[in-house]
Amino acid sequence: MAAKAQDESLPVKAVYSIFNQAPHAFFTLAKNDISEMADMEGKKVATSPFTSSNAFLPLVLKENGMAEDAVNLTKADPGALGPMLMSGSTDAIIAWVTNIALFADQAEATGNELVVLPWSDAGLELYSSSVVASERFLSERPDVAKRFMRAFDKSLKFTSENPRKAAEALHSMVPEVDMDVVTAQIGDTMELIMNEVSERDGVGALTEERVALTWDWVSQAEKLGHDALDPEAIIDRTLIEAL
């Protein structure tokens, strides 16, 4: 959306929603006495330099009655976030809920209890990860695009229903991954895909109302004028309708 708003000629369309909820969250430890968003006021928070979460942080704080600079933010290597939290070098970290199992495992290993505050529970309602396609591909190879989307849609539903089998398939390709952690990560990830939104609108749906809501957040996060983009201009529902 942000790219299209700044370059109307960008020849891509969003064709299928993967995460229909925001994946961003604060991660902390029970011993830090942070149980709700308001408790983040004045806390030390570590984040990775290039995560998309950083763009939405000021808006989430504002949405919850805090100043945009209410937390003391430090940027660190993504691999250092977990150790920083467990060692007490920071009160909280910013990461995606897809990593709950990973950080919970680290917390348990250090005698701690993980606490997660998802931003989707704090007012951040929007589409996140989606399948995008080039307009040329959609125009020149529509049948291939439809077959791909049918396979992708089927794979998501299979993974949701068979998380252990999906973890085994991943383990066969990447033997060093921990099967239990991966199975749990799949479960956490699926909550961004299969939830009350997908029950209401359908898996992969890109409804006009939620697309508009997403643009509201993105335009604010990227400091773009709200009229810089008609969000419907970047949507192609042909493949969803062909499922």
Image (cartoon, grey):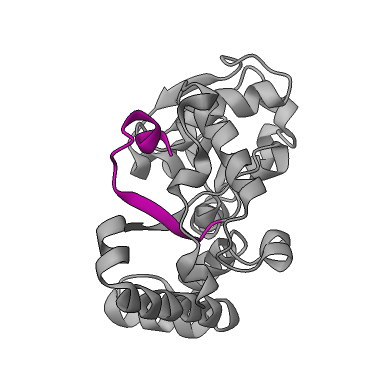
Residue 126's x, y, as percent? 60, 44
- Looking at the picture, does residue 28 appear above or below residue 203? above
Q: Give the range drawn in magenta.
A: 1-19
In the image, taking residue 229 as reference, residue 207 lies left or right, namely right
Q: Quadrant of the N terminus?
A: top left
- Looking at the picture, does residue 126 appear above or below residue 229? below
In the image, taking residue 37 as reference, residue 149 lies left or right, namely left
Return the residue nearer the eye: 131 or 73. Answer: 131
Identify the image quadrant of residue 62. Answer: top right
Question: At x 50% / y 54%, what residue is drawn?
Answer: 99
Return the residue nearer the eye: 72 or 136. Answer: 136
Identify the image quadrant of residue 174. Answer: bottom left
Residue 170's x, y, as percent? 36, 77
Question: At x 55% / y 84%, what residue is drawn?
Answer: 162
Residue 164 seen by the camera: yes
- How many dots with numbers? 0
Residue 26 seen by the camera: no
Residue 16 among magenta residues: yes
Return the residue nearer the eye: 92 or 49. Answer: 49
Residue 204 among magenta residues: no
* Identity of the residue furthest to the front in this view: 139
Question: At x 57% / y 66%, what residue is drawn?
Answer: 190
- Looking at the picture, does residue 66 appear above or below residue 84? above
Residue 10's x, y, as percent? 29, 42
Question: At x 66% / y 47%, what residue is drawn?
Answer: 209
